[in-house]
Amino acid sequence: MKIIISNQSELPIYAQIREQLKEQILNGQIAEGSTLPSIRQLAKEVGVSVITTTRAYNELEAEGFIATMQGKGSVVLPTDNDLLREQYLLRIEEGLSTAIETARAMGMSMEELTEVFKNLMDT
């Protein structure tokens, strides 16, 4: 797990941590059932306050990506939970919206776009 903090980012540090962890969970770099570093350990590794990492973990928990169990730490939830499924659907909708906008801009027909989609699904 790698977290990189940018001082030039418009996002606050806790949001940078949250977004990077979320991305690593969604793309499978952090597997479901994995235990995340403790809040104190991550704060030390990244060089931020415990309050900052606590906020990032709390938001990840509220979004359904992790569950925190006293004495066991924070664990990545299975991808079949409803909140995480909603995040995946949102990501799919955003990607498809971008593809549709691009297709419209170049005058592509619904049939052509559907064919591209079918081809991608088959690979």
Image (spheres, helix red, strand yellow):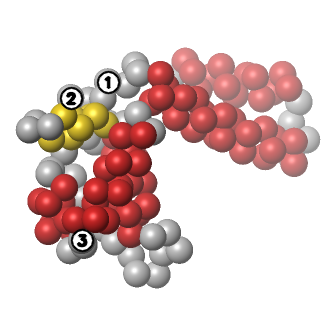
Cβ atoms at labels 1 and 3 below 8 Å apart: no
Type of amino acid at the residue the image marks with label 2: Gly
Q: Pointer 1 and pointer 2: residues touching (CB < 8 Å)?
A: yes
Residue 78 circle label: 1
Q: Residue at x 65, y 19 (%)?
A: 118
| Mark with earlier residue (2, 3) | 2
Q: Earlier in the sequence, mark 1 or mark 3?
A: 3
Residue 97 appears left or right of 18: right
Q: Are the residues at dot 2 and dot 3 in contact (C-beta closer than 8 Å)?
A: no
Give the residue pinned by disc 3.
49
**For mark 1, does the 10 Å Cα neighbourhood hold few (<14), some (14 to 19), or many (20 or more) residues?**
some
Dot 1 amino acid type: Pro
Q: From the viewer's perspective, is the residue at label 2 or at label 3 nearer?
A: 3
For label 3, count other residues whose C-alpha is less than 10 Å away and answer few (under 14), some (14-19) or many (20+): some
Secondary structure of the residue carrying tag 2 is: loop
Mark 3: which amino acid?
Answer: Ser
Most foreground residue, 24 or 12: 12
Q: Position of residue 105 (x, y in %)?
A: 87, 48
The answer to whether residue 27 is seen in the rendering is no
* Secondary element at tag 1: loop
Looking at marks 1 and 2 on the same chain, the residue that comes earlier in the sequence is marked by: 2
How many marks the image carries: the answer is 3
The outermost residue toward the front is: 70
Name the residue rendered at 15%, 67% in the picture. Answer: 45
Left or right of 109 in this view: 119: left
At horizontal 18% and vertical 34% (from top left) the residue drawn is 69
**Image quarter for residue 72?**
top left
- Residue identified by numbered label 2: 33
